[in-house]
Image (spheres, grey):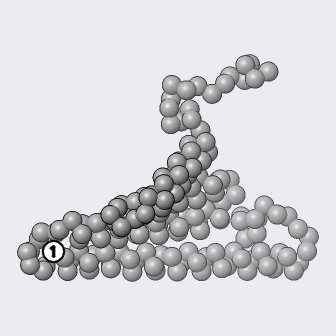
Amino acid sequence: MGIKDDIFSIDVESRSLNFLQYIIAFLLKVLAFMMVFVIICSVVDVGRQIYVSISSPPFAILNLEQILHSFGGFLVVMIGIEIFLNIILYFRKDRSHIKLVLATALMAIARKVIILDYKETPSGEMIGIAALIFALGLAYWLCKGPEKIFPQIKPPSKSAID
């Protein structure tokens, strides 16, 4: 089983297309290594920001702006981890990519909502963000399956479908 068999479900007899699939597989690995480097740098930066915040007067006390800035940093790291998982997921054919992509999008919009300045944000933008959250949540719920989120909802039995 070669690299293309692990990643791509496209089976082609063309040597040039197979070579291009190997290149894409290699580039995915490069992206994964680069993403790990970015995540490490982000964690170091968040740690530095927290250290600077608690070491300046008044010591060990964070104001609301510093707390929100720290939460934003944590969420950036978590989004980076989700993107890394998206890259790794391309190496597995047996998994659906859509749930993880939707979860990453939900995480990104959650970060936006947490660090959003509600006094400065126009109402049209807030309505758009709410609509986006609703649409992403609904899509994630539909992909996950309502019976897994709400166990009292039973999927139709096979005999009911026939």
Q: Where is mark 1, residue-wise? A: 54
Apparent side of residue 144 relative to residue 52 in the rendered image (left or right): right
In this view of the protein, which residue sits in the foreground, 98 or 84?
98
Kind of residue sitting beneath label 1: Ile
Instruction: Give the total number of marks visible in the rendering.
Output: 1
Apparent side of residue 34 relative to residue 15 in the rendered image (left or right): left
Badge 1 crowding class, 10 Å Cα cut-off, few under 14, some 14 to 19, many 20 or more, is: some
Which residue is found at the position 75% from the left and 65% from the top?
A: 8
Residue 18 in sight in this render:
yes
Residue 100 in sight in this render:
no
Q: Is residue 126 above or below residue 60?
A: above
Quarter of the picture holding the N terminus: bottom right
In this view of the protein, which residue sits in the foreground, 138 or 157?
138
- The spot of residue 96 in percent (x, y) is 65, 53
Question: Which quadrant holds residue 86?
Answer: bottom right
Quarter of the picture holding the C terminus: top right
- The spot of residue 21 in percent (x, y) is 77, 74
Q: Is residue 138 above or below residue 71?
A: above
Apparent side of residue 17 relative to residue 139 in the rendered image (left or right): right
The furthest residue to the right: 13
Question: Which quadrant holds residue 113?
Answer: bottom left
- The spot of residue 80 in percent (x, y) is 47, 70
Which residue is found at the position 23% from the left and 71% from the top?
A: 66
- The spot of residue 40 in percent (x, y) is 40, 77
The furthest residue to the top: 159
Which residue is found at the position 19% from the left and 76% from the top?
A: 53
The furthest residue to the left: 58
The furthest residue to the front: 123
Q: Secondary structure at mark 1?
A: helix
Question: Which quadrant holds residue 43?
Answer: bottom left
